[in-house]
Amino acid sequence: MPGEKKHFVIIGGGPAGTACATHAARMGARVTLIEKDLIGGAAHLLDCIPSKAMIATGGAMSQMNAAVDMGLARVDVELDFEALRERIVSIEDRLESSVSRLLESQGVNIIEGTGRLTGTHTVAVDRNDGGTEELTADVILLSTGSRPRIPEWAPIDGERVLTTRHAYPPPELPTKLIVIGSGVTGVEFVNMFNSFGSEVALIVSRQQVLPGKDPEVAAALEQSFIDRGVKLVMGARAEKIEVSPDAENNNERVCVFCDDGRIVKGSHVLMAIGSMPNSEGLGLDEIGVENEWGYVSIDHNCATNLKHIYAAGDLSGKLPLSSVASMQGRKIAEHAMGMHAGPHRHIDYEKAASAIFTDPEIADVGLAEADAFAEGRKIRVTKVPFSVSAKALINNDSRGFVKIVSDPATGVVLGGSIVGRHAAELISVLALAVTAGLTVTDLVESLFVHPALAEVLGEAAE
């Protein structure tokens, strides 16, 4: 009808869904958001936020224990596990509440339940209260997220054999933890529990942690782990887990068998081998939404092959980052409301900044040195260690480096990596440079604060 508001129906209330909902509502759309569990997203509020809160606590413990090197009397700190648990719940509640209030203030209709496609413009909802209803939509967004991947051979029990969802925090602090999976999530767990005092072993299926990352970055993290007493089981693929209820030694209740014959024993084991899309029951195949292994295929506007149906977040198979999901949600709202009729900037996933919250932190953006060489591209690579930084010495932490990749002909910044304290914050400077097409000269001529870790960015650019 003339003058009737365009109706958005969004299935999934994570970063993508909530960003799309609030943005579309501000532009005058009528928005219905369907979420069965947690406004703000399970992956975000039950994975990302709790893990970073635990890492922050572990980092504070490490800094307190190292205070003697900064002219302070030694202070021995202990982990209050219940206080940590309460802190995590408090952070989750506050964030969910703030997101819910924002949605409500924008007039978004929130339905607690599960949605599924029943037609090209219709969504059926099974409400948590037992009721059902059907919605008609002009625009549909699928943003149902993902869940931890569990192989058939892993007897997950939530007590001794854990997924990431069981570990924020776990039922008890592991005395001897085995982590399976050396990607981003796996190494963050190693860092976290090692800082809490757990003995940790990491099973690495390849010849370096963080496969696909810059080898120098991976080597720096490996050395940090070794210095902290982490056992690295390199080149081994876990294929079987056994839990013994009557083991004489509580620290050897769990055995992980590897494909090369090695056996790793511990008190607990944590699976961190990736995720799977939450696409079952969405009705994708029934109405003809193209997908591969459950990941919905999208174009540069995040639209599926049915142009009024969009997908975003982990379900879209792009970078599994909350920042990417939020940007997708915003871009979808703009595109569906007709704002992208003329020239505009699409999401460039290759320019997304990411961080790994280990100790030291790791962050990168844009073109990696190894990828450039593999593609035969001519690049200029400059690297400066934090040991030249006055602020790093003041902080009593001069580990790591800044590496910048640039075009040798134009000086345009193509990418970069940072290993060191506050890398997740510092990478934002390089992310802006990569996105805006700034040159190394722009960085060199920027007047950074002194003393500050950011000064190393200018030195690396020079």
Image (cartoon, helix red, strand yellow):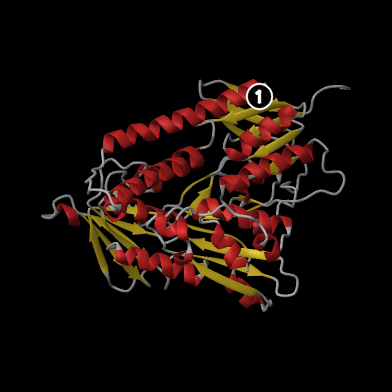
Image quarter for residue 113? top right
Image quarter for residue 207? bottom left
Task: Tell me what residue is drawn at x 27 percent, y 50 percent.
Answer: 65
Q: Is residue 101 above or below residue 368?
A: above
Task: Tell me what residue is drawn at x 54 percent, y 31 percent.
Answer: 39
SS type, badge 1: loop
The quarter of the picture where the C terminus appears is bottom right
Give the image location of residue 314, x and y in percent. 58, 48
Q: Is residue 457 above or below residue 78?
A: below
Q: Nearer the viewer, residue 379 or 100?
A: 379
Q: Give the amino acid type for the residue marked by disc 1 in the picture.
A: Val
Q: Residues within 10 Å of mark 1 (few under 14, many from 20)?
A: many
Q: Is any atom of residue 249 visible in this view?
A: yes
Q: Nearer the viewer, residue 325 or 407?
A: 407
Task: Tell me what residue is drawn at x 21 percent, y 46 percent.
Answer: 76
The reply, left or right, for residue 17 in relation to residue 402 is right
Q: Is any atom of residue 319 visible in this view?
A: no
Q: Nearer the viewer, residue 390 or 381?
A: 390
In the image, farthest residue toward the left: 248
Q: Is residue 103 above or below residue 343?
A: above
The quarter of the picture where the N terminus appears is top right
Give the image location of residue 120, x and y in percent. 74, 37
The reply, left or right, for residue 301 in relation to residue 372 is right
Number of numbered discs present? 1
Give the image location of residue 13, x and y in percent. 58, 34
The reply, left or right, for residue 316 in relation to residue 189 is right
Q: Nearer the viewer, residue 441 or 313?
A: 441
Residue that label 1 marks: 108
Give the image location of residue 79, x and y in percent. 26, 42
